[in-house]
Amino acid sequence: MRPWLPIAVAAMLGVSGLCTAAPEEFVEFPEFRYISALPGGGFGVTPEGRVGFDGALMMNVPVAYTPCSGNFVGGYWSGSTDPWDINIGTEGSDVNGTALLAAGLGKPEHGLYVAFMPTSKESEAVWNFQLQLRGDDWDKPAFAIGVQDSSNQRDRHKGVHKGGSRSFYGVATGRLGSEDNFVYLTLGWGGGRFNSRPFGGVSWPFHDHFTAFAEYDGFNANVGLAHSWLTRLSERQWNVVSIFGLVDLNRPLLGSCVTYSH
């Protein structure tokens, strides 16, 4: 058995056991609990800062690898607010959708991620930023700092219009295993949307067309599977990445994004 495999499985199971299912809709940070719209949230990012299917891929947890200049992402994901019901849409009480338009700036391994995340039909803006401070050299992980909802416009509590959703964080991502067989491990700490707790997860590229992931986002455990029609090592500039996830281990989430890297 490959030495990294039991570690990856143990990490997934450990993350998944950190919380239990909640019977009602999320009260705190309801617009940020289904997908992050941060680096790695529904799309892969390589240690060099290229977006696509290759690289670390999570759902609601940012990875430290940060898109650099020439990298763009656009996508939409729809999460059900009802446990075990698959509801897909752009509005209504039974869905929580996340749209994303993002671009990378700067040099590889020192990228600056800028993302626009509309949160309603009126495209109420959430601006997210992440700056990578060091690269991943196998011996030491990459490290980045970021902020979600930098302008502090959205509501921390559902139905209470007082803002308060600006969330700062720091995150590290590294690889465990050999160059041919490894997992991406992410660990960070954040305030606000991350519940002033550690967060993290594991991303396992177990197949050329599939990546499995498990994470703890400060509130809930989430798991999922990502798919790409192109292989992860394809040199094409365009790619489409789709994911199926379970938020809080019981709320289905579906979505896709288009990535471009040159």
Image (spheres, rainbow, N blue to C red):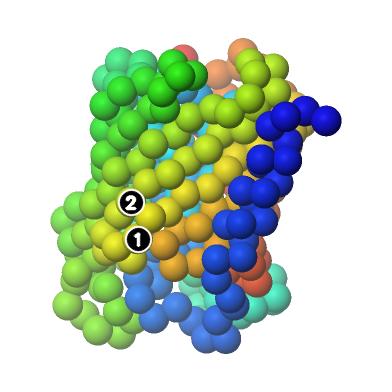
Which SS class for mark 1?
strand
| Residue 48: quarter of image | top left
Which of the pair 126/203 is nearer the observer?
A: 203
Which SS class for mark 2?
strand
Three-letter amino acid code at the position of disc 1: Arg
**Outermost residue toward the right in this view:** 1
Residue 22 in view (yes/no): yes
Q: Position of residue 184 (x, y in %)?
A: 56, 34
Which class describes the residues within 10 Å of circle 1: few (<14), some (14-19), or many (20+)?
some
Give the labeled residue for mark 2: 189
- The residue located at (63%, 25%) in the rendering is 177
6 left or right, relative to 127: right
| Residue 161: quarter of image | bottom left
Q: CA distance from mark 1 to mark 2?
A: 6 Å
Which class describes the residues within 10 Å of circle 2: few (<14), some (14-19), or many (20+)?
some
Check contact, mark 1 vs mark 2: CB within 8 A. Answer: yes
Quadrant location of the N terminus? top right
- The residue located at (44%, 34%) in the rendering is 173
- The residue located at (66%, 40%) in the rendering is 7
Give the labeled residue for mark 1: 197
